Image (spheres, helix red, strand yellow):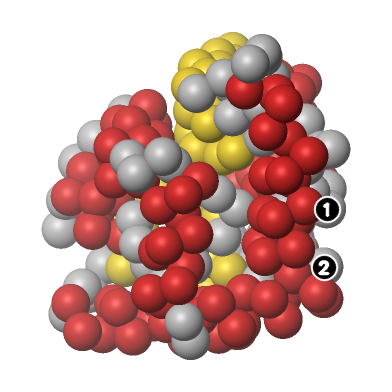
Amino acid sequence: MSTRGQRLYDWWSGHSGAQRFLYGLAFFGREGTFRRRGVEALALEPGERVLELGCGPGTNFDALRERVGPEGTVVGLDYSAGMAASARETVRDAGWENVHVVHADAATLPVSEPFDGVYAAMSLSAMPDPVAVFDATRSVLVPDGRVAVLDARPFQSLPWRVLNPLIVPLFRASTNWVSETDVTAALDAAFPTASVDGYYGGSIVVATGRLDG
């Protein structure tokens, strides 16, 4: 994430209500539905280790922890110091001993133990180099590890595409959205097995990738 993006998300970390409203618009009022689909696509099992890139205030921690159970591990990573602090507060308030937060860059993951899965929700499209992020992701996955991505991109088909001149500048300004970056293409190039499901004119994507074991 750029320095500008870091500052933006530091600001959003103190305005959670406004951020929820913005994501409500981005997900056509179905944010919870798509977040669940993203977590389900990762197919986590009890006892597994999962890393979330761009975890924000910890919105997905509860769902991820439910999947891996108390014997599993959830690690959330965010480049924004404000978001990392909010995520730690979420963990502290919930009393989760197996959920941890790291303030770091997703392209240079400072983790040593391998993960079974990596999740990224509405974060990769705000990062300047998703190819570097996926390279780093591959290095921390177990041999048959998998990744799931929930993200947004400009509308891909008509009639939705006529809205792009309005939507793209709005979200670029408010979320550091790098709309020209093709996150799904980067995922497809990085993982031998990959799939993409698109919704609402292709503007919302749930994508998965898996390493060959």
Q: Quadrant of the N terminus?
A: bottom right
- Residue 196, image quadrant: top right
Residue 176, image x and y in percent? 74, 61
The crowd level at tag 2 (other Cα within 10 Å; few <14, some 14-19, many 20+) is: some
Which residue is depicted at the point 33% across and 31% down? 37
| Residue where numbered disc 1 is placed | 128
Image spot of residue 131 (x, y percent): 80, 39
- From the viewer's side, name the closer residue of 195 and 110: 195
Q: Which comes sooner in the sequence, label 2 or label 1?
A: 2
Q: Amino acid at mark 2?
A: Ser
In contact (CB < 8 Å): disc 2 and disc 1: yes
| Alpha carbon separation for disc pair 2 and 1 | 7 Å
Instruction: Report the side of 130 relative to 78 (left or right).
Output: right
Residues packed near mark 1 inside 10 Å, few (<14), some (14 to 19) or many (20 plus):
some
SS for dot 1: loop
Q: As drawn, is 53 to the left or to the right of 188?
A: left
Q: How many marks?
A: 2
195 vs 14, nearest the viewer? 14
Q: x and y percent of residue 86 in the render?
A: 42, 82
| In the image, residue 67 above or below residue 182 | below
Q: Is residue 4 left or right of residue 25?
A: right
153 up-or-down from 62: above or below: above
Q: Where does label 2 land, which residue?
A: 2
